[in-house]
Amino acid sequence: MSPFRSSRTSHWLAASLLGLAVVTPALAQEEPIKVGILHSLSGTMAISESTLKDTVEMLIEQQNEQGGLLGRQLEAVVVDPASNWPLFAERARELLEQEEVDVVFGNWTSVSRKAVLPVFEELNGLLFYPVQYEGEESSENVFYTGAAPNQQAIPAVEYLINEVGVERFALLGTDYVYPRTTNRILEAFLKEEHGVADEDILIDYTPFGHADWQNIVAEVRRFGSEGKKTAVVSTINGDANVPFYRELANQGIDAADIPVIAFSVGEQELSGIDTGPLVGHLAAWNYFMSVDTDANYDFIDAWIDYNGDEEAVTNDPMEAHYIGFNMWAEAVRKAGTTEVDAVKDAIIGVTVPNLSGGYAAMMPNHHITKPVLIGEVQDNGQFDIVWQTPSTVAGDAWSDYLSGSRDLIADWQAPMRCGNFNVANGRCGGSTAAEEAEAALAE
Amino acid sequence: MRYPPMRGPTSARARAGAAAGGDRASTTRGAWLRLLVLALALALGLSVATPGAAQDGDPGGEAAATALLEALDVSSFPAKGEAIEAIVRSDDPRARDWLQALLDGRLQRTDEGRFVVVLDNAGREWPVEDALNGEALGEMSRRDLDRIGINNALRSQLRSAIAVVDLYAADVDLRRASAERLLGEVDGELAEPLVEVIEAEQDARVRQRLVQALAIHRLEQGEIEAIADLRGSLHPRVRVALNRAMSGDDPLVADAAREALNSIEQMLKVNRAVETLYFGLSLGSVLVLAAIGLAITFGVMGVINMAHGELIMLGAYTAWAMQQLLPGQPGLALMLAIPAGFLVAALVGVAIERGVIQFLKGRPLETLLATFGISLILQQLVRTVISPLNRTVVTPEWMSGSIAINDALSLTLNRMYVLGFALVVFAVLMLIMRRTRLGLEVRAVTQNRAMARSMGIRATRVDIMTFALGSGVAGLAGVALSQLTNVGPNLGQNYIIDSFMVVVFGGVGNLWGTLVAGLSLGVINQVLEPWAGAVMAKIIVLVFIILFIQKRPRGLFPQKGRAAEG
């Protein structure tokens, strides 16, 4: 009988304390599996990342209710990198070296991912990264469960061209690496594949948290009144979106005239906006809360129960963690151990159900297959799905539309085991493509 | 509601769909052409029989109407588009109501398959009525109802269809909206009845719009006289039409269009200048609002309060809290939030002053660090107690949208209110500082504390009052900002640097300086932004201020006299 009160948490606590205190081989299997969570709980990114921490904790709780993994319980180790990029690296080191976690779920911004990358590679950890990102990266130790540009941006633009008949594009973004890379890929894609002229593409960047959109929205309005169907492709990040959409509504830009398709605006961001005037604006994701499947309804119910908040919303990065967590659990079962190298090998090819009624498979380049959905904003803060790809799309680590990365592929299976293999000269890494891409970006 | 006269209304409505395609969706042009052919066929006599006849010889019957709605309840959007066309062609007297309900997302279906129109979709229980016979069905929750969803293309189609019907409406506002919508969407089919409509039209604005709409169509047909009707219009659709005519085949028309376009471009330049000025003043007013509280605590009292931004944030959260307390009355809540926001921020300001700042008098570095700590504590407090997520603050009806000065220039209302609010706050503050006993005492204490005390002024009390005033004004700024930007824990951080910038640039201790500095920085920023980009504009303004402060360390309006030296 446990000396603690019989709540479940204290029970695990007791078990884990016991496991830590008495490290004998006989008891080793009773030791919990440690799952690190590296999401900001304070600072600017807390707005997005704190719900992801809760998601992973909920998934761990669910897994434990089903008897844990390999007969062992799971235990969450939560650290707070406080939206501070260097602190991300420190906290990652703490998780891997001191806490000796078996796997880490974490990060949101690309800059934080770049900060922890060397730590995970040096200490051979496992990181599941759940957010859509700019691509141009494949690390042996990172699994990218969010969308690469070819799983979000490219299909979204194709939707605009083919289904909406858009001929002019205003690419608006926040001034950092994800929007800049994505817009570079989109610009190349529009010009090469669809012959869009220079004058029909408007690119504009704004600082983080930009609040005064009057001029830019007025410019978009003028840009869109030249007689050709115009759309805005928005990689505007987080906080800046509320004033942006407000200004759109106030200047009377209607979705039927100039639709805005956003890559960073989901249910959670909309929960801070009055969506009445925004009905019809678009977002491209791999998951929407409004997806009509039983798996999704179960997930939403569990999430609402876990939060105790009837109004709690789910979003795309949460689904990515759901997929990533289940993939990792499946790989651990397959490998029969949580040992990093074994899991890394076992996880490639693992297929788990996603929440939109299909399956996600882990590809050799550490990206996963995802369906692409286009949703229109409704006045209740949800999205109505108006289009989706007929089948899932495999994530492409290296874009086909950037000269520096066109020839690169990533394959972490034996015998190649390379994150940037150049098919043109048949060498791994030796190419300077990554640097070229970065140098081109800096232009 | 009056419906179109029987003179070919059916075909007029059918054309709405064709017009919807317009020039904006040339890829779907083929589909619209097909519809046009269909509409023509109908006009040529197929539609002489009542539309009901098309559906199993049940004229105007319920079965036909149900079938019309039934066709809407499909998942494919193109199929829905055809169903909308069928309703437009049906000539059913309820058609407009159905289309409007569909457009607003209020046309729904019950679990039993009955079509209903939701009358009011606020709250959880909605009053509904039967879509077919208008029978009131009491209240239903959204669980019992399935909404018939539409997408942007359908929204556009619906609006055009409604516009054509509304051309004959008795309500002048409906006719105005209709005329606005039809600009650039008139085609050969609609042009003919439009001439008669224009002749019968009494309202000058509707008439002018319709004349322009018709002129665009005539210009497309190559009629050079049409340009006379378009001259001087600043509407973008007119410009597009003239641009097209300019690159057309007929050199005469092209020249006339070019000439008309040149004069329009001239007027647009003036408009753009006015617009930029307005943008600048509006941004400036935000800067003034954020900085004016600081101008008192930092400028007049000399306290460096890094938690000033968080006081702004608390004001914004007060606006949110008031709206939570008064659901359904966002406007009233916002008005009440003005005194409440002032009070909350002022009380927190007093707590900061009494709790921390008074012990650090004369030690600016320590004050800076301590208040910075307070700002972090307040931010995290809001994150933990309320939520790290942004809160929705609803914009009241009378503050949303914009007022149109002309076709090319419209001023957004929420910013106009904020601009007015900033000026009022400034005026009241000036009044307090210049005309009240408190203002006199504040000035006395800040100029010479010891002397003021020996004259019997309670300096500590004045300190508290001044800090409360400055903090309260920050709260007011927060209430105003809740209408422009995010209400979240980071709100304050975004404004603290700008606030210090404005105060220092304007001249520490001078309220007029803050006003002039805020407004001029706003205008400079907005003038630079179009050609330098938002990021560069910010940098240029910062560099400019640094250079300016190098040259004139005391800002635009330095305090003069001996007081300034001490």
Image (cartoon, coloured by chain):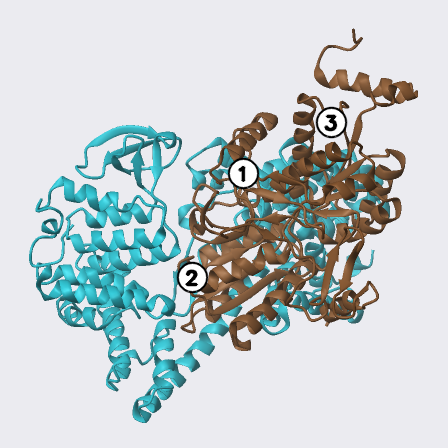
Query: Which label belongs to residue B482?
Result: none
State the SS at label 3. loop
Look at chain A in the picture and name its colour.
Answer: brown
Closer to viewer: mark 1 or mark 2: 2
Mark 3 neighbour class, 10 Å CA radius: few under 14, some 14 to 19, many 20 or more = some
Q: Which residue is mark 2?
A: A164
Location of residue A203 in the rendering, given as x and y in whole percent from the top left corner: 59, 68
User: Hey, what amino acid is under mark 1?
Assistant: Trp
The chain identifier of the residue carrying mark 2 reads: A
> In terms of secondary structure, where does tag 1 sit?
helix
- Dot 2 amino acid type: Val
Residue under numbered circle 1: B320
Residue that protrudes farthest toward the front in the picture: A415
**Residue found at x 47% / y 65%:** A161
Q: Which residue is at a point 77% across and 62% down the rendered structure image?
A: A421
How far across and down, in percent of the image, does residue A15 sit?
Answer: 81, 18
Q: Nearer the viewer, mark 3 or mark 2?
A: 3
Q: Are marks 1 and 3 in contact (CB under 8 Å)?
A: no
Which amino acid does the dot numbered 3 rest on? Leu
- For the residue pair A54 and B49, the one nearer the viewer reads as B49
Query: Which mark is nearer the camera, 1 or 3?
Result: 3
- Same chain, marks 1 and 3? no
Q: Chain of mark 3?
A: A
- Badge 3 is on which residue? A69
Residue B301 versus residue A248 in the image, above or below: above
Q: CA distance from mark 1 to mark 2?
A: 37 Å
Q: What's the colour of chain B in the image?
A: cyan
